[in-house]
Amino acid sequence: MDQFLRRTRLSDIVREFDLKADKSLGQHFLLDPNLLAAIAARAAPLTGLNVVEIGPGPGGLTRALLDSDAAHVTAVEFDPRAVRAIEALAADAEGRLTIIAADALRQDLTALVPAPRAVVANLPYNVGTPLLVSWLAQAGAFSAFTLMFQLEVAERICAAPDTDAYGRLAVLSQWLCETAIVMHIPAAAFAPPPKVDSALVRLIPRPNQPEQKQFRTMERVTAAAFGQRRKMLRGALKSLGGEALLRAADIDPERRAETLSVAEFVRLMETLLRRES
C-alpha cells in the first residue's frame, strides 16, 4: 500500500477535526480506502490531468487521487473543519495538491484550474444537480466528470426516453456527454449512512459542443417541456410557440416530453433558434 493510504485512518481524522457530517451541507463521508481507490480507478485515465475534487471532507478520495497518475489535484471545500483536515496532505503531496476554501457553486473551475482538467468527486447531496448543470454549460472545457450522486439522481442522468426517470437532466447530460453508471455504492458504505444508495456516474464530453446560445435555448425548451410533463407538448411549450413550433420541428404536438429522444429535443432547440433569429 502506498504512502497516502498508509496515513492516519480517516475515522481518526474525523474525530480529531470534529468532522461530524453536517446535514445542511449534504455531507456523507466515505472512509474505506479500498472503496475510495476503486472510485479513483473508475475515473482513469487521469495521467497528465488536473483533477478537481469538490467537497473532499476528511480527504479520503483526495488521497486516492494523489495516488493516481493525476498531474495535480485541486480540492474545493466549503467546510472550514474539512479544510483543516486535509491541509496536512498538502505538505506531503510534493506540490500536487491545492486546497481552495470556497463554495463550489460560486466557482468557475475553468478559471481555477488549467486544462486538461477533469472533475472527480463525491458530491454533497444538496448541490450535486446544480453543480452538474453548471459544468455542462462548459462541458467542452473538461476531459471527463466522475461524480457520486444519490442513486435516483444518477438514474435520472442516464435515463432512456419513455421511462419515469427521463427528464431535463437526462436530455442535457446525454446531449453533451456520453453517460454511464460505473459503480453502485450502498448506503451502508457512508458515514453516516444516508437513507438511499448512491452511484458513480462517468460523463465524457462529446467532441462537438454547442454554442452558449444553443445551450441556453435547450435549457428553456427542456424546462418548459418537463415543467408540465403531464401535458401534451402543444400545451407545455405554448409560451415558446406551441403547436406551430412543434410542427416546424416535425414533432407531433400531441406527444409528451418524456417520449422525445435527445435528437428530437435538439431539433426543437434548433427550430426555436431559427424562429427567434
Image: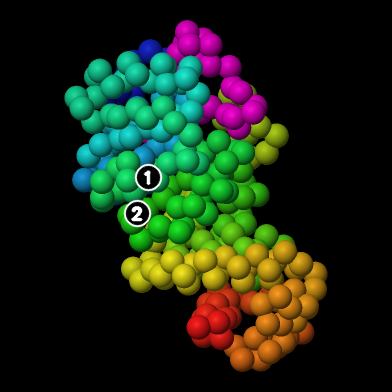
Mark 1 lies on residue = 109
Q: What residue is shown at x 66% (from left), y 32% (from top)?
A: 194
Q: Is residue 139 left or right of residue 240?
A: left
The foreground one among 119 and 134 is 134
> Is-magenta flag for residue 14?
yes
What percent of the width, then of the height, locates residue 137?
45, 59
Q: Is residue 170 visible?
A: yes
Q: How many marks?
A: 2
User: Residue 255, can we see it?
Assistant: no
Residue 203: percent from the left, percent from the top? 44, 56
Distance between mark 2 and mark 1 Cα atoms: 10 Å
Magenta residue span: 10-37
User: Counting residues from the N terminus, which is met first, the one under dot 2 or under dot 1?
Assistant: 1
Q: Secondary structure at mark 2?
A: loop
At which x and y percent is residue 75? 37, 32
* Residue at the (26%, 50%) spot, across then down: 115
Residue at image coords 37%, 45%: 109
- Residue at the extreme right of the image, as rendered: 230
Vertical comparison of 258 with 275: above or below? above
Vertical relation: 217 (above or below) 165: below
Q: What coloring was used for the rendering?
A: rainbow
